[in-house]
Amino acid sequence: MRTPSKASLLNKRLKKGYTTGTCAAAAAKAAAKMLFSGETISEIDVMLPGNSWVKMKLVDTMVDKDEARCGVIKDAGDDPDVTDGMVIYAKAVLADSGVKISASEGIGKVTKPGLSVPVGEPAINPVPRWMIEENVKSVMPAGKGIEITLYAPEGVERAKQTLNERLGIVGGISILGTTGVVRPMSVRSLKASLLPQVDIAVASGYKTIALVPGNMGEKVAREKLKFPEDAVVQMSNFVGDVLDYCLEKDIERILIVGHVGKIVKIAAGYLDTHSSKTGSPVEMLQGLVRKATKDIAPVMFMIRANTADEAATGLLKLGYKRILEKIATEASRQAMKHVKGLIEIGTAMTVLSGEVVAQDENAKRIIGEMIW
């Protein structure tokens, strides 16, 4: 009998929520229903993908002969979603025919190619757009038309906590979701938020990109190594997943740029570098140093090192840059092994000061041959 994992048991106890797409569809359907009936309502049944249904409560309802509007409070359940608790509004007015969807305050606009929404359009992804259209149509009388305008007064501020700006989505949040439901702390959702960066790089014509774990690596890649903004992709801990997507999108060359604490994990063979999946970076670094040299001095130094940053800067000061370069080489080897050698990958290792303390030969070649 299979024993459930701690993660699966935890997720069973956690409360699910609803996506911004579900909230937008609920507000849109309710506004449409009020516009055509002339009566205010307090809740609405919404169809989700897969023909399941959910009842959503409404706030700030208003209807007169020319328009109707209402809001739905985004409830992300137990997921730490930045949009949790904000209100997604929809305004409905009569139109000539069909269902027209637009957006105003707090809903972002797409400014870069490569996403699932065309440049210039509001950041309403295809599935939420379909949900809005189908739910609104279900309450429209035959021969009528309607325009739905989505807005979210808190959207501009909330969007600052997302990846929207670097994805080229300006002015607010995105209306997202593929199932209509938010599953607490969904790893799949987090990965999905990272991968569009690769789409933007490809759409911008880049075949060489930098993969960085976070803001430090991004700053080094852009300011010191001169990568264009759209050629830098944040991968968080999901090294393997992002590499797989790069392979799918025919990326040819990758420079991994990151702090020694992340790079040693990749060199040790971990393509998911979350602390819950790996051991101590210092202990891994100690093992890598022992493999890289027969000299006793760096091995003894590593015994006294308390952090990976201290270890890397100390090895550099002791004149053992070659050891750090060997570790960078091993990180590249592990990453290239994952993609079966179909992408050339180099590694540049940094410390907290932002200094690049080691590059392998692949990294030096990629940096030296970059033409933007």
Image (tube, rainbow, N blue to C red):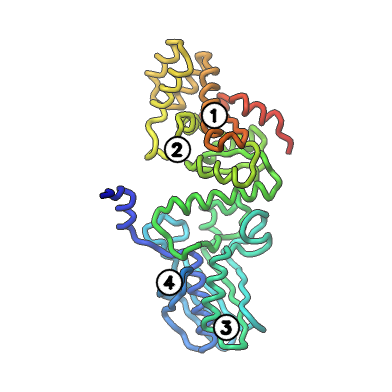
Q: Secondary structure at mark 3?
A: strand
**Relative vertical location of residue 80 with respect to residue 213 in this rendering, above or below:** below
Measured in 3D between alpha carbons, the distance from the residue under mark 1 to the one under mark 2, in whole angstroms, is 16 Å
Measured in 3D between alpha carbons, the distance from the residue under mark 2 to the one under mark 3, in whole angstroms, is 51 Å
- Foreground residue among 139 and 123: 139
Residue at mark 1? 333
Q: Position of residue 244 (x, y in %)?
A: 55, 43
Residue at mark 4? 52
- Residue at the image position 61 percent from the left and 68 percent from the top: 104
**Relative vertical location of residue 334 with respect to residue 167 in this rendering, above or below:** above
Measured in 3D between alpha carbons, the distance from the residue under mark 3 to the one under mark 4, in whole angstroms, is 29 Å
- Foreground residue among 88 and 182: 182
Which is closer to the viewer, label 1 or label 2?
1
- Residue at the image position 52 percent from the left and 81 percent from the top: 138
Residue contact at pointers 1 and 2, CB within 8 angstroms: no
- Specify the label residue 273 is tagged with: 2
Q: Secondary structure at mark 1?
A: helix
Residue at mark 3? 67
- Mark before the other along the chain sequence, 3 or 1: 3
Which is closer to the viewer, label 3 or label 1?
1
Instruction: Judge the density around disc 2: few (<14), some (14-19), many (≥20) Cα neighbours within 10 Å.
Output: many
Q: Secondary structure at mark 2?
A: loop
Amino acid carrying label 1: it is Arg
Amino acid carrying label 2: it is Thr
- Mark before the other along the chain sequence, 3 or 4: 4
- Residue at the image position 44 percent from the left and 56 percent from the top: 81
